[in-house]
Image (cartoon, coloured by chain):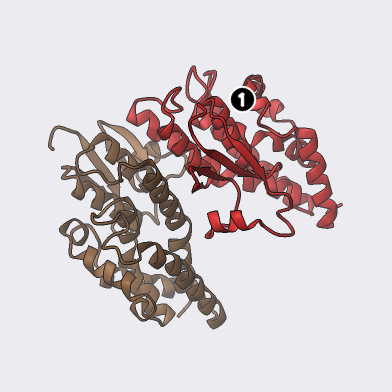
Chain colours: A brown, B red
Amino acid sequence: MGKDNVKLLSMWASPFCMRVKIALAEKDIVYEEILEEDLMNGKSELLLKSNPVHKQVPVLLHDDKPIVDSTNIITYIDEVWPEKPLFSACEYEKSRARFWADYIDRKVYPAGRAIWSSKETAEVEAAKKEFLDIMFYLDGTLGDKDFFNGDTFGFVDILLIGLTSWFPAYEKFGGFKLEDHYPKLAAWITRSWARESVSESLTSPEKITNFVAMMRKMYGIE
Amino acid sequence: MGKDNVKLLSMWASPFCMRVKIALAEKDIVYEEILEEDLMNGKSELLLKSNPVHKQVPVLLHDDKPIVDSTNIITYIDEVWPEKPLFSACEYEKSRARFWADYIDRKVYPAGRAIWSSKETAEVEAAKKEFLDIMFYLDGTLGDKDFFNGDTFGFVDILLIGLTSWFPAYEKFGGFKLEDHYPKLAAWITRSWARESVSESLTSPEKITNFVAMMRKMYGIE
């Protein structure tokens, strides 16, 4: 689909940008990625103009109109490019997908951040417990299905898998292995990473773990 | 529309339940409201079974299937009962509506709560400033339109107006008047409350303000 003018304002370490890249790849949408070089020392004029309220990546520019917030962007992509739908056609199943999307959006990244950014052992343990409690619910809703969407890779799969290149850093600095607790969820990660749309969109876990280690030094944690 | 089996698990003081009642009224959907009598001392079996993750009202039961989270419920209602649509048909406008919906969901109620639940004057002032900063953005996006949706009362209007029976309590305990800062937004509230779907769904501000005053006593604030 080369007919459209699609650009993505992105940053290599952002799991929310990675999500959008997966959705664009799943839909075979050709786009230009514009990388924010250095979010810590200043944001581009284009970013500030495109997302004046939150001033955050990702921003999708479609025919120069900005769409912001990763979950919102992915919903938009599915509406504008309806082939290979990301949602079930059943309204009830759609409502379940939106429910888990919201759950993931509010819980997973903050819990993971608390693991690697906490100094005290008790804080790290509490954050790890919170993270694993969240995974308990996600493992339960995945159940024995191949994907959260059922047989096909869909909306909830994209939203969660986009966050997983940070998971090895959570495991390393939290001292746990997800697969020891939730082998089905760990197998879903492996299965999803085998998709080209995923593996080519996600920054490598090694690079993310090095980035997190650098931030821990910067924050005086180690 | 009497063909459907629709029930709402609700609680009289919850602004999130009020939102859903407005959406049901806008769509002329006949439903049974099942009130949770006393959320502080125990939740009903039906609520715990219907919303095991968050254990919160509102829950919509449609043919006995539970849909949870007010914003999600209202989206579901619009999809299942498409007459009198709550969204623009334009995907870009829809994405803007979802953006503001998310903004309202994350910001307005917590900021309002911080106003009435803070003890120290400096904390109340900071919360009031935060609340008015949020209103600045909402006033800006409303602009000179009659409704957030344009000429018709839509998704963002429902999500925000559902929260407004708590506003007089924020004003009273924060010592401000919204209309002194944002007269257009205040006029939008008056205009929206003139709709039967709104006035009949919202608990009276007096009742909410008394409820808030009672909680402030309970928490030892006054």
Residue A163 appears anywhere in the view: yes
- Taking the spot 52% from the left edge, 79% from the top edge, the residue there is A125
| Quadrant hosting residue A149 | bottom left
For residue B188, above or below residue A197: above
Q: Secondary structure at mark 1?
A: helix
Q: Chain of mark 1?
A: B
Q: Kindly give the residue lying farthest to the left in the view shown.
A: A2
The percent coordinates of residue B170 (x first, y second) are: 73, 40
Kind of residue sitting beneath label 1: Ser
Q: Residues within 10 Å of mark 1 (few under 14, many from 20)?
A: some
- Taking the spot 32% from the left edge, 65% from the top edge, the residue there is A164
Pointer 1 residue: B197
Question: B177 and B222: which one is in front?
Answer: B222
The percent coordinates of residue A118 (x first, y second) are: 51, 74
- Taking the spot 57% from the left edge, 41% from the top edge, the residue there is B7
Q: Is residue A107 left or right of residue A150?
A: right
| Quadrant hosting residue B42 | bottom right
The percent coordinates of residue A199 (x first, y second) are: 19, 62
The percent coordinates of residue A129 (x first, y second) are: 50, 75
